Image (cartoon, rainbow, N blue to C red):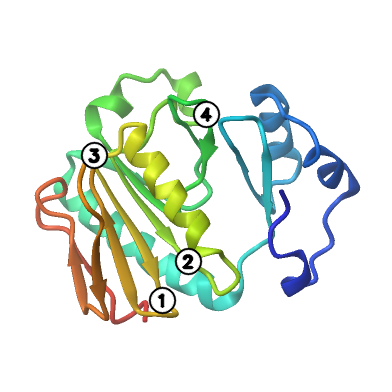
């Protein structure tokens, strides 16, 4: 699947276009990520390749602020490790996803060898954030959030800047929707971490 080709007028390599019509193996996917590192690539649990062009400037700015706030809290708290939007994680169902922000407990990171740390994270993050861009389909992002919950995430946020809305996901819980909040808290999973949304809106 190639996303947003018409809207952004981005030229995708013919090789990637061809691969969206057949299943891709995890090994092939890893090679593609190295070859086309300017693109965001994901792999579904059924082997479908998802190709996303670089984000627009405003989405990049919003994502940078999100990562900055999460990193600042992580360094102070020291109980886990956070990751930016170019980090791939292999979920238990076989999908390889790149959330816009992620955090895992320290013991998971410490259990990996140096070699393993150079590859995709071999688990679903404990906390994930997806930031919707103007060309994203929110319905697809909602499905991703459900997938994260079903594969081990304890908390997930889907942030929609266009509508100034935050969807909060937890396993086996109804989705909580916040309209135009100034902040959103990750307590108790990330005690003390409150995302300031005024800079993102």
- Disc 4 to disc 3, C-alpha distance: 18 Å
Q: Are marks 2 and 1 in contact (CB under 8 Å)?
A: yes
Residue 132: mark in rendering: 2
Residue receiving disc 1: 161
Residue 28, position in %: x, y? 73, 27
Q: Residue at x 38, y 33 (%)?
A: 124
Please state if 78 lies on the left or on the right of 61 as rendered: left
- For disc 3, the marked residue is 80
Q: Say which element carries label 4.
A: loop
- Image spot of residue 49 (x, y percent): 69, 40
Select label 3 or label 1 by which is in front. Answer: 1
| Residue 103 shown left or right of residue 147 in the figure | left
Specify the quadrant of the image occupied by residue 55. bottom right
Q: Earlier in the sequence, mark 4 or mark 1?
A: 4
Horizontal arrangement in the rendering, residue 91 relative to residue 9 (left or right) = left
Q: Which mark is nearer the camera, 2 or 3?
A: 2
Q: Mark on residue 118?
A: 4
Q: Secondary structure at mark 1?
A: loop
- 2 or 1: tag closer to the N-terminus: 2
Q: Residues within 10 Å of mark 2 (few under 14, many from 20)?
A: some
């Amino acid at each position: 699947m190639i996303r947003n080709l018409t809207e952004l007028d981005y030229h995708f390599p013919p090789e990637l276009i061809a691969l969206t019509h057949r299943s891709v193996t995890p090994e092939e996917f890893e090679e593609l990520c190295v070859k086309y590192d300017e693109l965001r690539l994901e792999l579904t649990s059924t082997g479908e390749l998802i190709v996303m062009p670089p984000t627009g400037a405003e989405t990049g700015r919003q994502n940078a602020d999100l990562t900055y706030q999460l990193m600042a809290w992580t360094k102070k708290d020291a109980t886990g490790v956070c990751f930016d939007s170019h980090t791939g994680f292999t979920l238990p169902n076989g999908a390889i996803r790149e959330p816009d922000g992620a955090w895992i407990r320290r013991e998971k990171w410490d259990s990996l060898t140096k070699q393993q740390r150079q590859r995709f994270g071999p688990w679903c993050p404990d906390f994930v954030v997806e930031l919707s861009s103007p060309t994203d389909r929110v319905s697809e992002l909602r499905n991703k959030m459900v997938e994260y919950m079903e594969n081990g995430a304890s908390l997930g946020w889907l942030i929609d800047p266009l509508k100034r809305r935050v969807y909060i996901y937890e396993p086996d819980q109804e989705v909580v929707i916040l309209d135009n909040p100034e902040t959103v808290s990750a307590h108790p999973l990330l005690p003390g971490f409150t995302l300031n949304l005024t800079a993102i809106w």
